[in-house]
Image (tube, grey):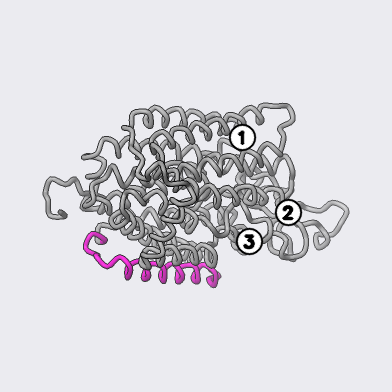
């Protein structure tokens, strides 16, 4: 297969574009996913930013993660059952429409003279549920539209789509939210949903793989029994789950960045994981020669741990950034082999239910929009300043900000009280990254 001269493989980058060339259905699904992911990643930045403007409370912002957690678990599993019971194309389109409506609600709310914070929580719950119902069907269609021998190339392309959107989307969303307001980000996301729906409507219909007489509970039990019969598949779930719960560093980035004097520290740290993942994916041509997926996943998980250890113990900003890049690259390589193993070995009639379990395994763990508990570890609340204050200029050129001698973070310069008794204000930019299956990462 790899020796076929007709396959359009980029020798410099190691990217095999064959799945996009040979499968029109996969190409449409891929482009729709990238367009939607750009808008959704931008929205993931705008929502916590707007909530911070409304509440001025990191605890309230962190509570967004709680609103998204329950539907992720419940609807993720049920979405896997529906992916095998229903027309997957119809389910994807229906949930895309729900997500578009939820974004329209955000847009209208942002235009109100007094936007309501509770709407953001309800919207986060609905979007998380819709995305969790949608994602297993997308994964199942990816397997269906790509020939078996091209699954590894498709996994690489999926990583490129996800990491590219994770870099560009939050950057554009953060700039637009600050310069034009959150409503501009929601409007742009409505445009991306419209373009995505046009492409999704052009996909062919798919038949259900689970007999109609089988109930939802029976179908779920059947999926769990199949998963338990595959220790190799369960091992990939456990490895990913442990990595996310024990060593996912995004929520700590504001605190790590506060150790350094460079005002751009937090911005580049947020880019560390996706940048490393993108570089590793673009140079992953060597992975076509690896056939022991389990060993490759274990080695990649060990490299992830080493990268996070370097991130945690280094006192140099650039070593910290290197640790994040190593971790992101290792996670990308692990993702290529995991997805390839899943799509090559799981029967199509089980793919939706297994995708529901997979989504839970890589979504549980610290989230960039759930960092409130960490902000209370010093026993006192920290109130974030507007991101525009941080992005506008270095702290030495902003007379209203100075560095706190107690915790090392930026503080508002005191007036009548001493600097030591001034209330800390953590200067951080907007949380901008989502893990691969962060809740409702659409068509990722």
Query: What crowding class fits label 1: few (fewer than 14 Cα within 10 Å), some (14-19), or many (20 or more)?
Result: many
Measure how far apart labels 3 and 2 are at the Cα level.
Answer: 12 Å
Q: Which badge, 1 or 2, is on the more N-terminal residue? A: 1
Single out the residue that lies furthest toward the front: 213
Residues in magenta, as a range: 287-315
Is the residue 433 above or below the residue 90 in the image? below
Q: Are marks 3 and 2 in contact (CB under 8 Å)?
A: no
State the predominant SS element of the stretch in magenta: helix
Q: Nearer the viewer, mark 3 or mark 1?
A: 1
Q: Which mark is residue 55?
A: none
Quarter where residue 37 is shown = top left
Single out the residue that lies furthest toward the right: 416
Query: What crowding class fits label 2: few (fewer than 14 Cα within 10 Å), some (14-19), or many (20 or more)?
Result: some
Which residue does the image show at 43% across and 50% down from the upper left? Answer: 219
Magenta-colored stretch includes residue 37? no
Q: Which badge, 3 or 2, is on the more N-terminal residue? A: 3
In the picture of the structure, the residue carrying the numbered disc 1 is: 182
Q: Tell me the quadrant of the picture where the N terminus can be found.
A: bottom left
Which residue does the image show at 42% across and 46% down from the upper left? Answer: 214
Q: Which mark is residue 255?
A: 3
Q: Which badge, 3 or 1, is on the more N-terminal residue? A: 1
Query: 338 or 3, which is in the foreground?
Result: 338
Q: Tell me the quadrant of the picture where the C terminus can be found.
A: top left
Q: Are marks 1 and 2 in contact (CB under 8 Å)?
A: no
Q: Position of residue 23 (x, y in %)?
A: 24, 39
Measure how far apart labels 1 and 2 are at the Cα level.
Answer: 22 Å
In the picture of the structure, the residue carrying the numbered disc 2 is: 425
Which residue does the image show at 47% across and 31% down from the upper left? Answer: 193
């Amino acid at each position: 297969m790899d020796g076929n001269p007709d396959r359009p493989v980029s020798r410099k980058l190691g990217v095999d574009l064959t799945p996009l060339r040979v499968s029109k259905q996969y190409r449409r699904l891929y482009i729709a996913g990238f367009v939607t992911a750009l808008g959704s990643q931008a929205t993931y930045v705008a929502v916590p930013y707007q909530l911070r403007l409304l509440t001025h409370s990191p605890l309230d912002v962190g509570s967004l993660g709680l609103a998204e957690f329950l539907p992720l678990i419940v609807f993720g599993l049920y979405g896997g059952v529906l992916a095998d019971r229903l027309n997957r194309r119809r389910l994807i389109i229906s949930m895309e429409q729900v997500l578009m409506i939820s974004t329209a609600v955000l847009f209208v709310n942002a235009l109100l003279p007094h936007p309501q914070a509770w709407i953001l929580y309800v919207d986060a719950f609905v979007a998380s549920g819709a995305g969790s119902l949608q994602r297993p069907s997308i994964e199942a269609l990816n397997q269906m539209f790509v020939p078996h021998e091209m699954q590894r190339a498709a996994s690489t392309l999926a990583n490129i789509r996800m990491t590219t959107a994770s870099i560009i989307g939050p950057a554009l969303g953060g700039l637009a939210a600050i310069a034009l307001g959150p409503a501009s980000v929601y409007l742009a996301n409505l445009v991306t949903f419209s373009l995505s729906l046009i492409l999704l409507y052009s996909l062919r219909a798919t038949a259900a793989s689970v007999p109609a007489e089988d109930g939802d509970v029976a179908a779920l039990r059947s999926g769990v029994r199949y998963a338990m019969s595959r220790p190799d598949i369960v091992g990939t779930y456990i490895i990913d789950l442990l990595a996310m719960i024990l060593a996912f560093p995004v929520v700590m980035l504001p605190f790590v960045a506060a150790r350094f004097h460079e005002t751009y520290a937090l911005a580049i740290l947020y880019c560390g994981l996706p940048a490393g993942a993108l570089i590793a994916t673009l140079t992953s041509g060597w992975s076509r020669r690896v056939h022991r997926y389990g060993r490759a996943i274990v080695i990649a998980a060990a490299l992830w741990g080493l990268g996070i250890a370097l991130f945690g113990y280094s006192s140099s900003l650039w070593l910290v950034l290197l640790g994040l890049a190593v971790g992101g690259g290792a996670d990308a390589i692990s993702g290529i082999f995991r997805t390839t193993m899943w799509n090559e070995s799981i029967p199509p009639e089980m793919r939706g239910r297994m995708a529901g379990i997979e989504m839970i395994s890589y979504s549980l763990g610290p989230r960039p929009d759930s960092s409130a508990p960490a902000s209370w570890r010093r026993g006192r609340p920290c109130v974030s300043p507007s991101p525009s204050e941080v992005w506008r200029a270095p702290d030495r050129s902003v007379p209203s900000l100075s560095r706190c001698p107690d915790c090392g973070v930026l503080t508002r310069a005191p007036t009548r009280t001493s600097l030591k008794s001034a209330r800390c204000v953590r200067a951080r930019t907007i949380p901008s990254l989502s893990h691969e299956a962060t809740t409702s990462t659409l068509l990722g």
